[in-house]
Image (spheres, grey):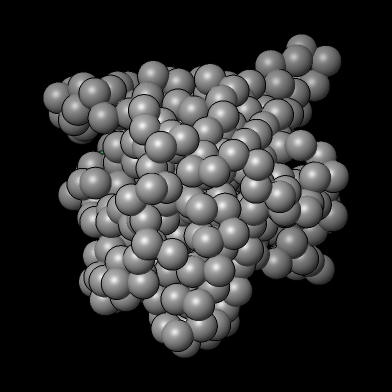
């Protein structure tokens, strides 16, 4: 007599149920944060895996795999016959399995065959198009497999293109769905209202209403328009006292960035070096500050404080900005507003532009939103630019007359 094994899965909420009823081969599911994408994708993958088929879960980076791995391991515990974190595979009674792949490598999954695949947080995958067309899609050929893409949108990227395909009647294999966070009955609407207050409107629309914005909901907009293409060389100082030098000091393994703006918001100098020797840093700052007769604006928190003291002792005009998570917000907002209003002209520095474009809103563990560089990226160019721009705003009224107070 076969024994009956009972597994407990979450019961889909109505929004999830609508998606799970889809019979389309490829489902593109665009949802607000916390809608229940990862939970719904788990409900979906369990069925073919239990029916004895090979299945796979793809996510942009390894860190996104921990949650579904733990949760699926726990749901499927009574039927797991083997699980190897090294192989990243859960094997099930009946011959089915779930493989876990990070899309860090666009070749992930190549040469396997699957009956169903999940691509969670699809819009965050850097090489989504290559991963889908060259690696994942072919894994579905042998078994006529299905695929679901789950994501919060990120502008008009490849995930959006897939979404558009799903809306096209001439593409019957694809079907699209869109749900806001509010469609998850397990999320307190007060949390959503909190986010509405914390975030710029366009970011709220992207993250919670799942709108595909033309200009993805990063922190800084119109960055490309602010760059003077081909302008790489520093410009000679023209007006005495009309410059602000923003300094982001190298801390542990990042860079020191020196950024000079003139009073019109035009960047005239940029330097980035990864020498954390304090003497070298002070000498470089002093040289640039003297060349432009600039007011130095630097982060004087922690290790920055003694540097601030040294610069002040050298007779430079220095404005300390004590950077904390609370004081960073207005500094970043000020820069964002300057870029929005077209008040800043940037030199054509690739790493500076990349940092500005990538800067993003992130949800903290305590469910607050902060603006940061994505994990693994630096923010030193952004901070130096923000400090320089702040310096421009602060010194503007007295420009032209400040130099007299400075010992040289
Ligand atoms: N069907 C359900 N039954 C009970 N709770 C659910 C259900 N679906 C989602 N939840 C709960 O809602 C919350 C969000 O779910 P989930 O993590 O799946 O959302 P998400 O859209 O993947 O979020 P994120 O945008 O953070 O990745 C979790 O606390 C989850 O337990
Ligand atoms: Mg999720």
Residue at figure coordinates x 42%, y 47% from the top left: 403
Residue at figure coordinates x 24%, y 52% from the top left: 325
Q: Position of residue 158 (x, y in %)?
A: 72, 36
Q: Position of residue 127 (x, y in %)?
A: 72, 53
- In the picture, the quarter occupied by the N terminus is bottom left
Position of residue 193 relative to residue 243, above or below, is above
Q: Which of the pair 349/69 is nearer the observer?
A: 349
How many numbered discs sit on the rendered protein?
A: 0
- In the picture, the quarter occupied by the C terminus is bottom left
Residue at figure coordinates x 54%, y 73% from the top left: 284
Q: Choose top left, top right, bottom left or bottom right for residue 61.
A: bottom right
Q: Which of the pair 187/272 is nearer the observer?
A: 272
Q: Which of the pair 153/399 is nearer the observer?
A: 399
Q: Position of residue 101 (x, y in %)?
A: 60, 66
Residue at figure coordinates x 28%, y 23% from the top left: 196
Residue 314 appears in view: yes
Please give left or right for residue 209 compared with residue 193 in the image: right
Position of residue 123 relative to residue 77, above or below, is above
Please give left or right for residue 24 compared with residue 325 in the image: right
User: Which residue extends farthest top?
Assistant: 169
Residue 219 appears in view: no
Position of residue 307 relative to residue 240, above or below, is below
């Amino acid at each position: 007599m076969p024994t009956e094994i009972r597994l407990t899965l979450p019961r889909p909420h109505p929004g999830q149920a609508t998606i799970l009823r889809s019979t389309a081969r490829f489902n593109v599911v665009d949802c607000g944060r916390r809608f229940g994408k990862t939970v719904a994708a788990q409900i979906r993958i369990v069925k073919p895996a239990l029916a004895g088929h090979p299945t796979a879960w793809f996510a942009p980076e390894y860190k996104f795999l921990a949650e579904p791995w733990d949760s699926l391991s726990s749901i499927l515990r009574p039927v797991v016959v083997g699980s190897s974190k090294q192989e990243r595979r859960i094997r099930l009674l009946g011959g089915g399995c779930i493989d876990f792949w990070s899309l860090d490598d666009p070749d992930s999954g190549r040469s396997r065959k699957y009956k169903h695949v999940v691509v969670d947080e699809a819009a965050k995958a850097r090489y989504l198009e290559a991963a889908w067309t060259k690696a994942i899609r072919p894994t579905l050929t042998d078994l006529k497999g299905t695929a679901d893409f789950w994501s919060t949108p990120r502008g008009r990227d490849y995930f959006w293109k897939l979404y558009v395909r799903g809306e096209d009647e001439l593409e019957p294999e694809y079907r699209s769905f869109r749900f806001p966070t509010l469609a998850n009955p397990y999320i307190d609407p007060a949390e959503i209202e909190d986010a509405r207050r914390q975030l710029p409107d366009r970011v709220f629309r992207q993250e919670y209403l799942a709108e595909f914005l033309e200009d993805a909901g990063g922190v800084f907009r119109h960055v490309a328009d602010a760059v003077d293409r081909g302008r790489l060389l520093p410009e000679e100082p023209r007006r005495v006292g009309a410059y602000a030098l923003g300094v982001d000091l190298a801390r542990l393994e990042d860079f020191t960035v020196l950024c000079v703006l003139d009073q019109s918001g035009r960047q005239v100098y940029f330097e980035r070096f990864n020498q954390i020797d304090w003497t070298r840093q002070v000498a470089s700052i002093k040289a640039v500050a003297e060349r432009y007769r600039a007011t130095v604006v630097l982060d004087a928190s922690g290790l920055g404080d003694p540097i601030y003291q040294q610069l002040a002792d050298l007779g430079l005009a220095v404005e300390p900005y004590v950077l904390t998570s609370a004081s960073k917000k207005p500094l970043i907002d000020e820069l964002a507003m300057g870029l929005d209003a077209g008040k800043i002209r940037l030199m054509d520095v690739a790493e500076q532009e990349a940092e500005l474009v990538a800067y993003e809103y992130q949800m903290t563990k305590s469910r607050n939103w902060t603006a940061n560089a994505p994990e693994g990226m630096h923010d030193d160019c952004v901070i130096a630019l923000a400090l320089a721009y702040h310096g421009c705003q602060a010194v503007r009224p007295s420009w032209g007359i400040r130099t007299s107070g400075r010992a040289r």
